[in-house]
Image (cartoon, rainbow, N blue to C red):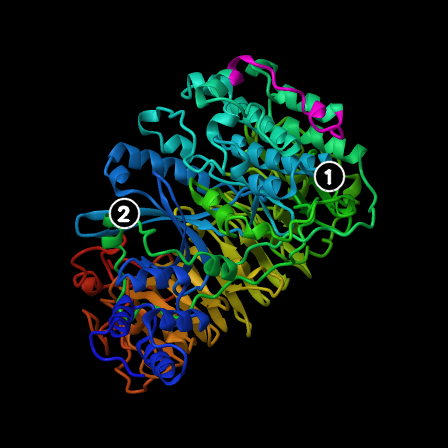
Amino acid sequence: MNATTGTPLESLIVTLKRSGLIDASVLTQAVNDFRQQEGGSGPEDLTNVLIEKELITPWQAAKLLKGKHRGFFLGKYKLLTLLGKGGMSTVYLAEHVVMKRQVALKVLPHKLVQDSSYLERFHREAQAVAVLDHPNIVRAYDIDSEVDGQLEIHFLVMEFIPGHNFFELVRALGQLEPLTAADYIRQAALGLQHAHDAGLIHRDIKPGNFIVDGAGVVRMMDLGLAKAFRKDEDFSLTVANDEKVLGTADYLAPEQAVDSHNVDTRADIYALGCTFYFLLAGRPPFNEGTLAQRLLAHQSKTPKPVHRIKKDVPVELSDLIMRMMAKDPKKRVQTAQAVADELSAWLETNEEEPSGDSFAQLETPTVESLLRSNRGDGNDDAPEELVDFLSRLDSNVMTESPTGVSKSDSTIRRRGKEPDSTVHVTADSSKITRRSSSLVSSSKSSHRSRRTKSISQFWMWGGGFIVLVALWLMFSGDGAEPEPNSPPSPPVVEEDPAEESLEPLSPIAGSTITVGPSGNFRSVRTALLYVLEQDPSKARFQKIELAAGQTFEEHLAIDNSGLGQFPRGFEITGDESNRPVITGKNSSLLSLKSVEGLTVSNLVFDAANCPSAISISGYSTGTTFRNVAIRNIGQRGIQCFGVSGLAQQPVTCENCQFESDQQPVVAIQFTSESSIEASFSSTRHVQIRQCRFLGQFDSGIQLNEDLEDLIVERCIFQNAQTAIRFAGSERAIMGALICNNTFYRCARAIVIESSQVDRISEMSFVQNLFVENPDGEVTTRSPNVSLADIGKNGPPTRLNWSTGPSQTASEWLNIFEDGGRLNVDDLEFVSTDRESDNFLKPSKPDLRSPVKTPFRGAGFIGAVAPR
């Protein structure tokens, strides 16, 4: 029956409309359908229907039923459910409103961010954690903030990993088998060593801070914020309120309880030993008495050896735990790497053949199961200041229903698929690799089987979201994703690479390795191999310098997709005034997979006989190409597969030149491959600055995948068919800034092919100069697109000039309304010769005077400052 105005049902409908969670037309249709059905007419009945249709989540429904229409959006993220709440943060499962990627958002309390010293310390340490990239560390994507009046909210965007932490595993399975526990701690130690190498101490190692995903890979969480969250660096010896996730005191090194200021990495070794003890014994080393008594036990007592508690634990493992837990830090195992090495050797020695036993099935939670398990009662709200702040609720916000991650195989392999922590440098069919000595061969690990206890009712123990409450209550680091891209074909070399000597031909001076006729090595490939043979902890070498003017016929491939030991901050460079040339045939001249912090500079790539000059894929945080020329492009200049940087450390191409007179050729192409996992198949945080695209390119820059945060500025595009092409009818674009570029005699300057305008936002065009672009400056595939549609939340589009006229075609996007000019007929350049230093430099100051406030440092229109 129909409800009358003012009834609880009508109140709920009003709240739903105000919330912005559901598109108005979709909500109207759903309500009409509900009123026509039999069997229910109350507000709870309506929310149940909306949940079933996946238009809202149970957590959202509980809030809506209490009349709350705010608190569902934070910036560009829609909150799906509350994962956990503690004194230091509130954590939500959220979905990017455009990219539809599920993440975990940690919202920091307003009272703490008001402390400027705390906030500075938090950002400093969070940025340090964000650059960690290792298969055994959960990844932090970004740090962001929102301001609303007097209120400022800071939050972290983190990788969402459905899985089970060590505590939940032990609670469900009981004491773990020695082989399983040893492998888990081995993986944990590898992640911990990576953090230690970066100068970070975890200081909160415990079972709740390690998660095992559906593939059996262990990832470390909550890295770094234990320190950042301690006001004035004072350490609080209190147990977590939720005793189901054991408190810090049960895993605290003796010296850390006395003075947390001066602990070193060995405090983490102690805590990891306690965690190892827990996996095998089913309890921490000292589990009786009050908090003070347990802390005192860590100071003065020796725990019962674990092999006396669990009879099948080998004495070797029990002894290792005791050495990890030595009271005196000097008597402990000194590094996490040493722990991993010892466990790797033990695992190899104790390899088991498959027993044929079936594995118990352990269901890995998905987004869907999390949302359905957390209905809540509407009283789990964040602090009032946060509720007041979370008010991005207008109906223009994306309102599609949450999309869950695909459910993985529910069988958790006890050994798990071994993440390849290898750095590969390849140059021929005799692929040369350098493996971390701590790793066990994945071909062997896949043959191990483990007997487990049945836990078919595991996720009835308190709900499937418990592990994520533990997961996000502090801070997470980064995980990495290998990038599929076939290794290059063999290069043409004069000698058998397998017989090349890695001994320098002359002494190496300082941190720079020289390559050339009189250099330390004759080939770049050999120099790279030599770098990888060195102790990574010493990081002596920082640069490979190629001899001026020399030509090197080489194909170079650096595969760091297993997050191995290729050094960050490394540079491959040449002489700026006489750049060396790299050339070759049949495959990419340079292939980079998940290589971070690398700078390639002052080089020329001759790609006449190659499908692409450079191939780059995966996480490439901070990787930069500077003053590089790519000539004679045959197909692609730079081919990018799922390339991702960070907001503070983008992937950068600056002061580079791309040349080709062939078609169809693309200078820079961003694309994905079907084998790339969906979460990593978009381009993120890329900047292209002060580059020249010269020649008959089909596209200067072409984006064939979803995009987040692209900046193209001060670039020159000459004679291209399309200068910048956002390809694909269903692409999501979240943040594209096109500013201070000159588009000279390109048929089309910018083309936006996406037909889903509601998936485009923060797209801005500022201070660009368009010269003789007959088919339009900015065109769209969807008619009647407006800047309001695609530019929301981005810098305002303004001050664009063009020599062309206004167009009436519905596909033409008018970017000239705010301070722009059309039909500019008095434009002159100092030179139109692309070899000239004054190429496309305006000879009159007209393009400078309209700019009253410089944008990103540019007080003029176009790529080149006028005279």
The residue depicted at 50 percent of the width and 24 percent of the height is 252
Q: Mark 2 points at which residue?
A: 383
Residue carrying label 1? 440
Note whether 169 is above or below 642 in the view shown.
above
Is residue 222 visible to us here?
yes
Label 2 close to label 1 by CB (< 8 Å): no
Closer mark to the observer between disc 2 and disc 1:
2
User: Amino acid type of disc 2?
Assistant: Pro
Question: Over which residues does the magenta segment extend?
Answer: 297-314
- Decide whether the magenta segment is chiefly helix, strand or loop: loop
Please name the residue shown 47% across and 26% down the image.
Answer: 249
Task: Identify the disc placed on residue 140.
Answer: none
Q: Pointer 2: residues within 10 angstroms few (<14), some, or many (20+)?
A: few
- Please name whichever residue, 297 or 681, is drawn nearer the observer in this view of the structure: 297
- Horizontal and vertical percent for residue 264? 49, 22
Q: Which quadrant of the view contains residue 212? A: top right
**Which image quadrant for residue 96?**
bottom left
Relative vertical location of residue 163 with respect to residue 88 in this rendering, above or below: below
Look at the numbered disc 1 and give the secondary structure of its residue: loop
Picture coordinates of residue 123, whole percent (x, y): 35, 39
